[in-house]
Amino acid sequence: MTRFDVFMRECGVRASVYARRAGISGSQLRRLRRGESEPTRRLMVALTETASAMLSRPVYMVELFELSRADEAIYAALMERRSA
């Protein structure tokens, strides 16, 4: 399970609506969720901006994608802050 898939499940984001708003196909979204496809940086930005708009809150790219080891500390801090 990818971080992107976990995010979508936890936030209750509907895949069909998310794909349409992000400007991608449903099959492309499924491949991303399963980790069968790697998004470009441009697509990561589009998916992050779309999530922010749909959830009416700031969403950070690190919430959706594993970017680097350094970003893992940022992700952990975000998740800790949300659970507090």
Image: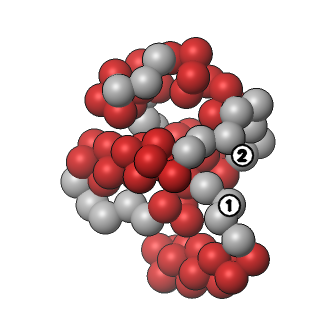
The residue at 50%/17% (across/down) is 26
Image position, residue 20 (x, y; %)? 34, 22
Label 2 sits on what residue type?
Thr
The residue at 23%/54% (across/down) is 56
Image position, residue 73 (x, y; %)? 66, 83
**Does residue 58 appear left or right of residue 83 in this picture?**
left
Helix, strand or loop at disc 2? loop
Res 65 visible: yes
Q: Which residue is mark 2?
A: 2
> Which comes before the other along the chain, label 2 or label 1?
2
Image position, residue 22 (x, y; %)? 35, 33
Which of the two marks, 2 or 1, is nearer to us in this view?
A: 1
Label 1 sits on what residue type?
Glu
Question: How many numbered marks does the figure carry?
Answer: 2
The residue at 49%/61% (across/down) is 61
Q: Quadrant of the N terminus?
A: top right
Q: Is residue 22 above or below residue 42?
A: above
Q: Which residue is mark 1?
A: 66
The residue at 42%/36% (across/down) is 13
Location of residue 71 (image quadrant): bottom right
Location of residue 65 (image quadrant): bottom right
Image position, residue 7 (x, y; %)? 55, 49
Check if mark 2's residue and mark 1's residue have beta carbons within 8 Å.
yes
Q: How far, Cα to Cα, is label 2 from label 1?
A: 9 Å
**Does residue 56 appear left or right of residue 60 in this picture?**
left
